[in-house]
Image (cartoon, rainbow, N blue to C red):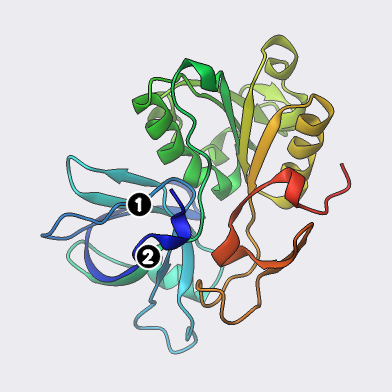
């Protein structure tokens, strides 16, 4: 499916709950009376921030999960500025306006021929990997998650990830899992992977991409360039690629590493 051809919607969604997972992160669950439109892992939505005089632009937020049974869209939000702090103040029953789904997501291999898929995330970059893992498991695969954080308290939604596959963890201080960065985890030496999907801080993704390139493993990364419009009109999220300058919001945010001009 060409995700760029998917229909985009402007929706008013009702807040089911806002749960603070960490001093910097909240999980917002949204719903509406009608069935939510189809959304794919790796895509995102643009959220209008109401009640903040400082916030004019919508905020791009990754789709964390789509619960079809409850007809819920989950957004994992890092409170890094006034707009996202305002979002964290939402309460059950509030109405949130979104535009989506936007962008192109991760590849969706299916069946035994797809092999073993490793999903690598760090910080709020773990967000799109939960839905991706759920879709992969639904397709008959057993995804493996490798999640990194500064310390144990910064690891997010581990119980949710464990529903869909094995979870391996690194922390910089060694407070949980193996000490170090994700690319230093011993699972990378012990197991064979056919595809790596990654989202997180750019230095982490570049290190993952380097490992994948050296091991000749297909790899896709979800870029987090600053995005304003979400539709490829404002050109503030441009990334240089082998095909020229591309808008991350429209042509990405997910790219195969072979397209990127990263020094691997």
Q: Which x, y percent locates residue 19?
A: 33, 51
Mark 2–mark 1 Cα distance, whole angstroms, equals 8 Å
User: Total number of numbered labels?
Assistant: 2
Q: Judging from the image, what secondary structure is the residue with disc 1 in? A: loop
Q: Assign the C terminus to one quadrant of the image.
A: top right
The foreground one among 183 and 264 is: 264
Residue sticking out furthest to the right? 263
Residue 104 to residue 68: above or below: below
- Report the residue marked by disc 2: 100
Dot 2: within a 10 Å radius of its alpha carbon, few (fewer than 14), some, or many (20 or more) residues? Answer: many
Can residue 150 be seen in this snapshot? no
Counting from the top left corner in percent of width and height, residue 60 is at: 49, 66
Label 1 environment density (alpha carbons within 10 Å; few <14, some 14–19, many ≥20): many
Q: Can residue 151 be seen in this snapshot?
A: yes
The residue lying at 17 percent from left, 65 percent from top is 93
18 sits left or right of 244 in the view: left
Residue holding disc 1: 39
Expressed as whole percent of the image width and height from the top left, the position of residue 247 reads 63, 68
Cβ–Cβ under 8 Å for marks 2 and 1: yes
Up-down: is 154 above or below 240? Answer: above
Which residue does the image show at 82% across and 54% down from the upper left? 261
Q: Is residue 190 above or below residue 23?
A: above
Q: Nearer the viewer, residue 178 or 109?
A: 109
First of labels 2, 1 by sequence position = 1
Position of 161 with respect to 200 (left or right) is: left
| Along the viewing direction, whichever of 259 and 202 lies nearer the viewer | 259
Residue furthest to the top: 190
Which SS class for mark 2? strand
Give x and y (percent) for residue 244: 77, 66
């Amino acid at each position: 499916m060409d995700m760029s051809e998917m229909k985009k919607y402007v929706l008013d969604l009702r807040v089911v709950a806002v749960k603070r997972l960490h001093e910097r992160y909240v999980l917002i669950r949204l719903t509406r009376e009608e069935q939510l439109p189809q959304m794919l892992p790796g895509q995102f939505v643009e959220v209008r921030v109401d009640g903040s005089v400082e916030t004019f632009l919508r905020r791009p937020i990754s789709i964390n999960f789509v619960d079809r049974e409850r007809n819920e869209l989950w957004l994992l939000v890092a409170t890094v500025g006034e707009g996202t702090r305002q979002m964290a103040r939402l309460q059950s029953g509030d109405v949130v306006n979104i535009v989506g789904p936007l962008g192109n997501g991760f590849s969706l291999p299916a069946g035994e021929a797809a092999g073993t898929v490793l999903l690598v995330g760090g910080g709020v970059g773990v967000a799109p990997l939960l839905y991706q893992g759920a879709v992969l498991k639904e397709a008959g695969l057993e995804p493996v998650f490798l999640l990194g954080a500064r310390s144990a308290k910064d690891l997010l939604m581990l119980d949710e990830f464990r529903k869909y596959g094995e979870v391996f963890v690194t922390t910089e201080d060694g407070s949980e899992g193996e000490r170090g960065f994700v690319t230093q985890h011993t699972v990378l030496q012990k197991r064979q992977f056919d595809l790596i999907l990654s989202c997180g801080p750019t230095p982490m993704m570049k290190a993952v991409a380097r490992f994948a390139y050296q091991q000749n493993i297909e790899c896709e990364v979800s870029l987090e360039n600053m995005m304003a419009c979400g539709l490829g009109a404002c050109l503030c999220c441009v990334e240089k690629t082998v095909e020229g300058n591309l808008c991350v919001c429209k042509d990405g945010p997910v790219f195969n590493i072979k397209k990127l001009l990263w020094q691997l």
